[in-house]
Amino acid sequence: MLTQIYKPGQGKYSRLGSGFAVGIVVAIGCYNLFGVLQASEVNPWIATLVPAGILVAFGVALYWLLNKPSAADFLIAAEGELKKVNWSSRKEVAVSTLVVIIVVIVMAVLLGTTDFIFQLVFRQLIG
């Protein structure tokens, strides 16, 4: 039962993506732990086996979690919803980005001009 995959044909990419992302984070953490333990005065066997054991334990826990019915059903539903999304075309993204850049520049110029005018007015009033 532990090695059986829950709904094997569904949610493949969301499970793989989640598994790889968490696996990479755990692997980087274990590598950093190995570096810390190796730099200290710890037995080399302990410095090697502790991070390896943590990595294996997290791997087993991750496999179990990704095949747990509630988590797997969530990932399957999330992948199904992402397939329904209407993604913007490359041209729409480029035009929208250009509009945002232009609006930011115009707002910066307007705020800068307003700030400059307020500086002049308050210098005249104070000075």
Image: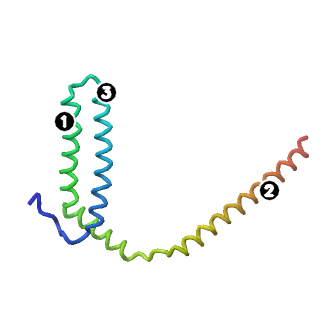
Farthest-out residue, top: 41
Q: Of marks 3 and 2, which one's residue comes earlier in the chain?
A: 3
Placement of 83 over or under 1, stated as above or below = below
Q: Position of residue 80 (x, y in %)?
A: 32, 73
81 lies above or below 109: below
Q: Secondary structure at mark 1?
A: helix
Q: Secondary structure at mark 2?
A: helix
The residue under label 3 is 39
35 is higher (above) or lower (below) than 54: above
Q: Which residue matches tag 2? A: 113
Reading the image, the residue beneath label 1 is: 49
Q: Looking at the rendering, in which quadrant would you find the N terminus? A: bottom left
Percent x, y for residue 85?
Answer: 41, 75
For mark 3, give the secondary structure.
helix
Task: Tell me residue 35's x, y (percent).
Answer: 31, 33
Q: Is residue 122 left or right of residue 49?
A: right
Horizontal arrangement in the rendering, residue 2 relative to residue 117 (left or right): left
* Identity, as a three-letter code, of the amino acid under mark 2: Thr
Q: Which coloring applies here?
A: rainbow
Number of numbered markers:
3
Q: Mark 1 or 2 closer to N-term? A: 1
- The residue sitting at 32% across, 68% down in the picture is 78
Can you tell which quarter of the image residue 76 is in?
bottom left
